[in-house]
Amino acid sequence: MTVYFIGAGPGAADLLTVRGQRLIARCPVCLYAGSLVPREVVAVAPPGATLIDTSALHLEQIIGHMEEAHAAGLDVARVHSGDPTLYGAIAEQMRRLEELAIPYEVVPGVSSFTAAAAALGIELTPAGANQTVILCRAAGRTGLPPNESLAELARHRVGMVLFLSAAQASAVADALIPHYGPEAPVVVAYRVSWPDERFLHCTLATLTDTLRSADIHLSALILVGPMLEPATARPSRLYDRHYSHRFRRGEARPPDRS
């Protein structure tokens, strides 16, 4: 018996990985976060499978269902939104399973930040611009380590994707504006790949008002950084005809006759 922590992807059922879908389709017990995972994702569960929405359950109740399945020798599909290793709260579940000697495995999923970049048609690390992307969040109710404050991270002025931060838009803007500037472009990606997906374009100065006007407080990413400014990018050397690497010899450059 194994508990499989499965990344369900950002929302669209066809962004679930093949491995994740196959596991859901054969596990007789499926625990899923119904507030974040569409029912269509777990609809492939086998006939007669036990489907449990964990939205209203606390940790011990969730572990209790896993213990029951373990006692009965039944595999469990524990389905989380996006990729379970990013803000998925799986560490505490895995610790409890280790204490109970219940085997588990993590199956990665498509994260909402990569799905957002794909939908926007942007590269998160364009050549000549930022080569780093910081995945982070505002402090919120759970706080942050002192060295991970938004103001501290923003000093690098690289690409930044904020999860779980739409409700703290004002604090986000206050922390980022001194480093990126008030006119820095921002994209708010709401419920990426869901039927009601929305992308809002604004600046750091208008972020708070934009989110307030759109009545968006949850299920949104905030993207900021050089990757949103195409003029800062340049062509990658990888496909330059004159660039050599171990798989291709570059063409000789024509002589400079100036």
Image (spheres, helix red, strand yellow):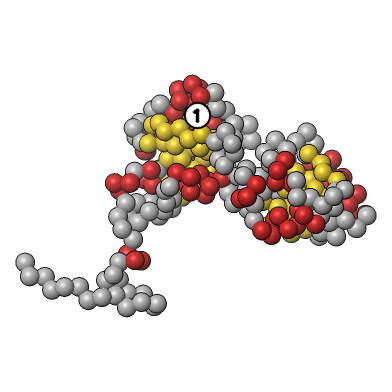
Residue in view at x 88 percent, y 56 percent: 74
Quadrant in which residue 52 is drawn = top right
Extreme-front residue of the structure: 47
Quadrant in which residue 187 is drawn = top left
Expressed as whole percent of the image width and height from the top left, the position of residue 256 reads 11, 70
Q: Is residue 37 above or below residue 110?
A: above
Q: Is residue 132 above or below residue 11?
A: below
Please indicate, yes or no, whether residue 250 appears anywhere in the rendered image. Answer: yes
Neighbour class for label 1 at 10 Å: few (<14), some, many (≥20)? Answer: many
What amino acid does circle 1 point to? Answer: Ala
Give the left or right position of residue 36, taking residue 181 as reference: right
Extreme-right residue of the structure: 72
Expressed as whole percent of the image width and height from the top left, the position of residue 177 reads 39, 33
Q: Is residue 53 above or below residue 85?
A: above
Q: Quadrant of the N terminus?
A: bottom right
Does dot 1 land on a helix, a strand or a loop? helix
Quadrant in which residue 39 is drawn = top right
Extreme-left residue of the structure: 258
| Residue carrying label 1 | 169
Give the left or right position of residue 184, taking residue 168 as reference: left
Q: State the residue in front, 240 or 167.
A: 240
Q: Quadrant of the C terminus?
A: bottom left
